[in-house]
Image (spheres, coloured by chain):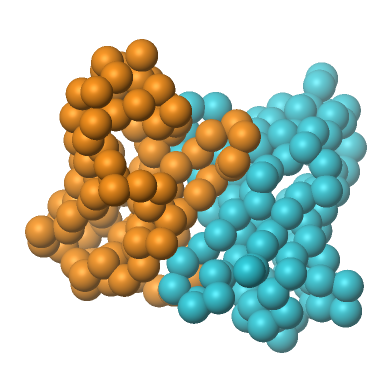
Chain colours: A orange, B cyan
Amino acid sequence: DAGVIQSPRHEVTEMGQEVTLRCKPISGHNSLFWYRQTMMRGLELLIYFNNNVPIDDSGMPEDRFSAKMPNASFSTLKIQPSEPRDSAVYFCASSLTSTEAFFGQGTRLTVV
Amino acid sequence: GESVGLHLPTLSVQEGDNSIINCAYSNSASDYFIWYKQESGKGPQFIIDIRSNMDKRQGQRVTVLLNKTVKHLSLQIAATQPGDSAVYFCAGPNQAGTALIFGKGTTLSVSS
């Protein structure tokens, strides 16, 4: 298995633009997580899906952020409109159990 | 709410020395903890986990100790190598037990 696949690896965009981050979880995993990592706040859980259904989105910072999981093999995290303070590394992770989560390589987002 | 946190943001050791990375947690109901390693430009990678009914667990060159009395766990790396240089995170379940929450991380630097 190729592991969790995220795209793009790097994204530079202008303030106000829409940004879409993509994730393909490990086949067979039933849980998917989106995390955001910054120097100041570390790794923060944004949203968690189980069997494609959003279970907990309490970590989503604002209405500008939205996430979808239309099927078991694909998820998106969208920011619209983007702001400079959204600059961070965004990780997608998947798991089969409630314990170990497997992380993708991350998307480094820079909003200028 | 629940939290996990590391004691020291950085740790510098000489190659061949043993390294000890510490972590404290607040949720006494947590039934497991996980240590992750994150190398530069990559996502966090699972190292070892420990269940709350255990005091110690050993892996290859790594040992995790859990002290439930003081809500503390540690990761010990034996004979530290330059390839061990990374950021190390402890993680535990959130209140609902549905996702992992992470500490801020300790950056381990190994010099030859």
Whether residue A6 can be seen here = yes
Residue furthest left as drawn: A70
Q: Position of residue A76 (x, y in %)?
A: 20, 46
Whether residue A109 can be seen here = no
Query: Which residue: 29% across, 48% down?
Result: A63
Q: Position of residue B111 (x, y in %)?
A: 81, 21
Dividing the image into 4 quarters, which one contains the C terminus of chain A?
Answer: top left
B4 or A81: nearer the eye?
A81
Q: Position of residue B8 (x, y in %)?
A: 83, 42
Q: Answer with the quarter of the image where residue B30 lies.
A: bottom right
Query: Which residue: 52% across, 63% down?
Result: B100
| Image: A49 above or below B13 | below
Q: Is A10 positioned to the left or the right of A75 in the image?
A: right
Q: Position of residue B26 (x, y in %)?
A: 74, 69
Q: Is B93 positioned to the left or the right of A98 in the image?
A: right
| Image: A13 above or below B22 | above
Count the labels in the image.
0
Query: Which residue: 73% across, 40% down?
Result: B106
Q: Is B61 positioned to the left or the right of B70 in the image?
A: left
Q: Answer with the quarter of the image where residue A86 lies.
A: top left
A90 or A61: nearer the eye?
A61
| Image: B25 above or below B41 | below
Query: Which residue: 62% across, 34% down?
Result: A40
| Image: B109 above or below B59 | above
